[in-house]
Image: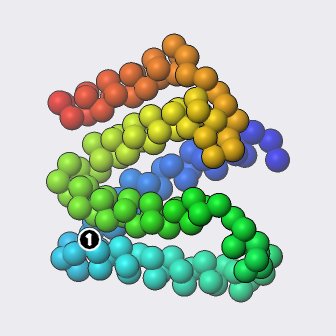
Amino acid sequence: MNNTFFISTAFITGSLIPLQLVFNAQLGAITKSPYSATLIVFVIGLLAMALVALVLRPAFPTWQELGSAPPTVFLGGIIAAIYLVAIIFVAPKLGVGLTTALILCGQLVMALLLDHLGAFGNPQMPLNLWRVAGVLMMLGGVFAIKMH
């Protein structure tokens, strides 16, 4: 597969995030709780992935393989739960555009920090003027969205 496929996949996946904000905020309004809404989202996600696993039959790691993994690999589920609760709580207050812009800026700042440090086994990509300028331009976009 070439880079066009991966770039397109990343872009399309990113375009789903604002939809997720809207749908999860609607669910939060119905349930009147970001916690119960998040639980419902995770149950639906679990059922969807169970169906995918039944159809595709992917290989699963052994308990021994899972036990030898660094504990940090299991934090993704906790981070996903925090993220869902936060967007259900924040999106109705700030709007989908500003919430999405702030999430993207937070993602970019953390990603550049992880790249700079080469954290968690990722390749090290030092921070430079161009990367800092990219973050500053995105922050300028957040300011423009917030103010106008």
Which residue occupies 31% across, 65% down? 85
User: As drawn, is 127 to the left or to the right of 85?
Assistant: right
Q: Secondary structure at mark 1?
A: helix
Which residue occupies 47% across, 56% down? 16
Image coords of residue 71 (percent x, y): 59, 63
Q: Amino acid at mark 1?
A: Pro
Which residue occupies 76% across, 77% down? 64
Image coords of residue 89 (percent x, y): 23, 61
- Decide which of 52, 60 is in the foreground and name it: 60
34 up-or-down from 17: above or below = below
- Decide which of 28, 129 is in the foreground and name it: 129
Image coords of residue 103 (percent x, y): 37, 45
Q: Specify whether residue 39 is in view.
A: yes
Q: Specify whether residue 108 is in view.
A: no
Which residue occupies 43% across, 26% down? 135
Image coords of residue 93 (percent x, y): 17, 54
